[in-house]
């Protein structure tokens, strides 16, 4: 009974990770398109590879669980939910691919990009940075720089920014905001001063 419970818990956790990751990809893909940001589009491409691997592992895990006839129908529902998250991830990757291919955006989108006052910046948390070991809430990044954190990447894991997310040295932090805050943002995150 305990082993079945652990397996069910792992299936649930994996499905939540698939759902959260595909949603984050869509957010990043739209931002990449609206800000014409290769940074964000490249992150979406990396995430798409991760979702493909997660989805395969998820399906194998669901298929490996043994159950009665009634439980099998429920497992089929879980597999279908996994397929939906993978389709969302694929759609986000297609949106990001528009940015990565380059070329001219649609004239209306081009006007939006040109008139946008926002920018996207990526910075790596330095060993000596004041943000190491602090929660995003405590770093006060928006107040200090005018930049808003979009995503934090730690190794091969992407995280939606939450106030309680603790930053570690080596984290890649991608933020969006006004161009005037870019330098302050890079200095704060990296811990390097000119």
Image (cartoon, rainbow, N blue to C red):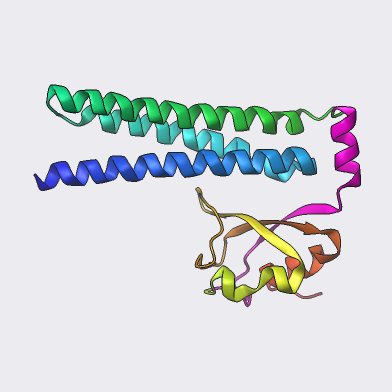
Asked whether residue 181 is in view, the answer is yes
Q: Residue at x 91, y 46 (%)?
A: 115
Asked whether residue 43 is in view, the answer is no
- x and y, in percent, of residue 71 in the image: 18, 28
Quadrant of residue 28 within the rendered picture: top right
Q: Residue at x 68, y 33 (%)?
A: 96
- For the C terminus, give its image quadrant: bottom right
Q: Residue at x 25, y 46 (%)?
A: 9
User: Foreground: 166 or 143?
Assistant: 143
User: Foreground: 84 or 152?
Assistant: 84
* 130 drawn magenta: yes
Quadrant of residue 66 within the rendered picture: top left
Quadrant of residue 174 within the rendered picture: bottom right
- For the N terminus, give its image quadrant: top left
Does 122 sit above or below residue 185?
A: above
- x and y, in percent, of residue 73 in the image: 23, 23
User: Foreground: 191 or 5?
Assistant: 5
From which residue to which does the magenta span run? 106-132
- x and y, in percent, of residue 63 in the image: 25, 26
- x and y, in percent, of residue 27 in the image: 63, 43
Q: Residue at x 58, y 40 (%)?
A: 25
Does 164 sit above or below residue 30?
A: below
Task: Decide if residue 166 is on the left or right side of residue 179.
Answer: left
Does 179 sit above or below residue 193?
A: above
Task: Decide if residue 10 is on the left or right side of residue 151.
Answer: left
* 49 drawn magenta: no
- As drawn, the residue found furthest toward the left would be 1
Task: Decide if residue 70 is on the left or right side of residue 109.
Answer: left
Does 50 sit above or below residue 151?
A: above
């Amino acid at each position: 009974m305990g082993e079945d419970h652990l397996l069910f818990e792992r299936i649930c956790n994996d499905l939540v990770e698939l759902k959260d990751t595909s949603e984050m990809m869509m957010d990043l893909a739209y931002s990449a398109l609206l800000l014409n940001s290769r940074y964000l589009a490249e992150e979406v491409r990396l995430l798409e590879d991760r979702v493909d691997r997660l989805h395969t592992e998820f399906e194998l895990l669901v298929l490996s669980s043994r159950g009665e006839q009634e439980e099998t129908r429920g497992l089929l529902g879980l597999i279908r939910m996994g397929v939906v998250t993978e389709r969302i991830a694929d759609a986000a990757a297609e949106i990001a691919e528009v940015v990565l291919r380059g070329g001219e955006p649609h004239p209306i989108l081009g006007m939006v990009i040109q008139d946008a006052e926002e920018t996207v910046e990526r910075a790596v948390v330095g060993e000596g940075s004041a943000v190491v070991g602090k929660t995003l809430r405590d770093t006060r990044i928006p107040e200090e720089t005018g930049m808003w954190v979009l995503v934090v990447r730690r190794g091969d894991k992407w995280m939606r920014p939450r106030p309680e997310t603790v930053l570690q040295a080596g984290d890649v932090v991608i933020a969006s905001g006004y161009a005037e805050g870019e330098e302050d943002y890079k200095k704060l995150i990296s811990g390097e001063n000119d």
